[in-house]
Image (cartoon, helix red, strand yellow):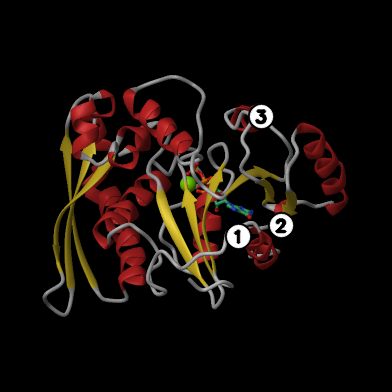
């Protein structure tokens, strides 16, 4: 074993929308996890692997922990998030620099008497007009919990993210790398491609509609110059199907256009994307449907 190399797992946790996925993308240097202004965008456990000369850090992006009980999908997602806090070397709790919310305290409450070091990242400091507001926030945070470190960052601009990474590394055990140095995630290209379509549903559809959708990649052909993809968008009701498609299919077209841009950036190749919308009533509350979409794989 290389006595100076460090390797470990670091879980990013926090209520929905605090910027966990934005941070993991920034850390890895490539977009592997989808983001949106809507809470509960992430539904799966996704690893982001950052390898440097002396360290390999495996960051675990988790769905935002929601303490509200609800459909099977919500329970499955929360179980995934909580399971991701076990057996890791460092826990990072992320809060928004606007200050502690009840939901942040709830997430903190799920840690119980953990013996794993917990680092607090105060994100979105680019939005703070008055940086002096950080000092009382840090003092309040120290009062709430014995955080090993408290680091203000901006996942969006990258402010202080290098310092955050250097700090996290100090808490990792010595050990050999667990993944090849060029591997950025545990997720397949197929999975991430389906996610890029789902991201556009979250970004472009109104109100509750994104929460009643899921995406399944049904064809992936990279044998030619252009990568040809077909994805199926699952919706709950015929009325939802009409809304996703939009007048003269304009909405679905726009979803396809934006998803294709992201896919081309991710795959580094030209992409042809076809989207189909399919009604499957009650899929979000149906364990069989959730299994088919891979929602329970994270818990295995
Ligand atoms: N201004 C600003 N916005 C940010 C920052 N980090 C994330 N955001 C925005 O916050 C929103 C939520 O970001 P996500 O990364 O999707 O948040 P998340 O914690 O992964 O959310 P869930 O997956 O829903 O739990 C997006 O609109 C991001 O662009 C930041 O440092 N500054
Ligand atoms: Mg997320």
Vertical comparison of 100 with 186: above or below: above
Whole-number angstrom distance, CA of label 1 to CA of label 3: 24 Å
Q: Label 1 CB, ligand 1: below 8 Å?
A: yes
* Location of the C terminus (image quadrant): top left
Q: Position of residue 243 (x, y in %)?
A: 28, 37
| Residue 85 horizontal side relative to residue 281, left or right | right
Q: Nearer the viewer, residue 222 or 82?
A: 82
Label 3: which secondary element: helix
Q: Secondary structure at mark 1?
A: loop
Mark 3 sits near ligand 1, with its Cβ under 8 Å away? no
Question: How far apart are the two marked residues, 2 and 1, measured between alpha carbons?
Answer: 8 Å
Q: Residue at x 36, y 51 (%)?
A: 200
Residue at point 28%, 41% (across, down): 297
Discs 2, 1 touching: Cβ within 8 Å: yes
Residue picked out by circle 1: 156
Q: Which residue is mark 3?
A: 105
Mark before the other along the chain sequence, 3 or 2: 3
Is there any visible trace of residue 237 in the rendered image? no
- Taking the image as shown, residue 271 lies to the left or right of residue 94, namely left
Comparing 229 with 16, the one in front is 16
Confirm if mark 2 falls within 8 A of ligand 1. Answer: yes
């Amino acid at each position: 074993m290389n006595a100076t190399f460090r390797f470990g797992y670091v879980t990013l946790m926090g209520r929905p929308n605090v910027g966990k996925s934005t941070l993991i993308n920034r850390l890895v240097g490539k977009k592997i996890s989808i983001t949106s202004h809507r809470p509960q965008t992430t539904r799966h456990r996704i690893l982001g692997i950052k390898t440097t000369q002396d360290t390999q850090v495996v960051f675990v992006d988790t769905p935002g922990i929601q303490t509200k009980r609800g459909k099977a999908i919500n329970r499955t997602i929360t179980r995934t998030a909580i399971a991701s806090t076990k057996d890791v070397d460092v826990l990072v709790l992320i809060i928004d620099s606007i200050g502690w919310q009840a939901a942040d305290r709830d997430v903190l409450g799920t840690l119980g008497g953990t013996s794993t070091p917990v680092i607090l990242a105060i994100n979105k400091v680019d939005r703070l007009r008055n940086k002096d507001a950080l000092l009382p926030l840090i003092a309040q945070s120290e009062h709430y919990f014995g955080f090993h470190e408290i680091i203000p960052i901006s996942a969006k601009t990258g402010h202080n993210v290098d310092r955050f990474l250097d700090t996290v590394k100090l808490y990792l055990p010595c050990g050999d790398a667990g993944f090849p140095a060029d591997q950025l995630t545990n997720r397949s290209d197929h999975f991430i491609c389906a996610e890029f379509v789902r991201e556009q549903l979250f970004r472009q559809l109104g109100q509750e509609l994104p929460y009643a959708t899921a995406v399944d990649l049904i064809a992936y052909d990279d044998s030619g110059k252009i990568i040809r993809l077909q994805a199926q968008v699952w919706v709950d009701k015929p009325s939802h199907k009409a809304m996703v498609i939009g007048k003269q299919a304009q909405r679905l077209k726009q979803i396809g256009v934006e998803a294709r841009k992201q896919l081309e950036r991710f795959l580094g190749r030209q992409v042809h994307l076809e989207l189909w919308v399919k009604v499957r009533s009650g899929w979000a509350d149906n364990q069989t449907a959730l299994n088919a979409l891979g929602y329970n794989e994270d818990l295995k």
